[in-house]
Image: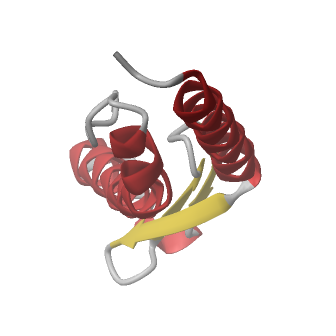
Amino acid sequence: MIPEGDMSGLLAQAQAMQEQLLNAQQELAEMEVEGSAGGGMVTATVTGSGELVGLMINPEAVDPSDTETLADLIVAAVRDATNKAQAIAASKLGPLAGGLGMGGGLPF
């Protein structure tokens, strides 16, 4: 049995960690991360939580007779940005989520 004083301290600690987790999630949602492909021919911007919010395509990357390459560059740029966002999220949320018994895994 846990003494009452220890339980209130434990609850306060859990509440503080939950608040830190929520603050980190909000910070990630507001952060923007860029990824690119083709030497910068295509640049994708995602939030720290992984939402695609921007896509820049250099006109030189557009060849009407080869849209497959452009599509591949777009996918690669989005993947690059998403991987960077996941790494940032893991570094910010991993320790907090683990401390709340949620494991370090992220739902990306």
Residue sitting at x 26%, y 50%: 66
Image coordinates of residue 93 in percent, x first then y, are 47, 50
Residue sitting at x 26%, y 35%: 103
Image coordinates of residue 40 in percent, x first then y, are 45, 79
Residue sitting at x 31%, y 46%: 75
Q: How is the image coloured?
A: secondary structure
Residue sitting at x 73%, y 52%: 27
Question: Quadrant of the image for the N terminus?
Answer: top left
Position of residue 77 relative to residue 47, above or below, is below
Between 72 and 97, the one nearer to me in the picture: 97
The residue lying furthest to the bottom in this view is 39
Image coordinates of residue 32 in percent, x first then y, are 67, 59
Q: How many discs appear?
A: 0
Image coordinates of residue 26 in percent, x first then y, are 74, 42
Between 28 and 74, the one nearer to me in the picture: 28
Position of residue 32 relative to residue 68, above or below, is below
Question: Quadrant of the image for the C terminus?
Answer: top left
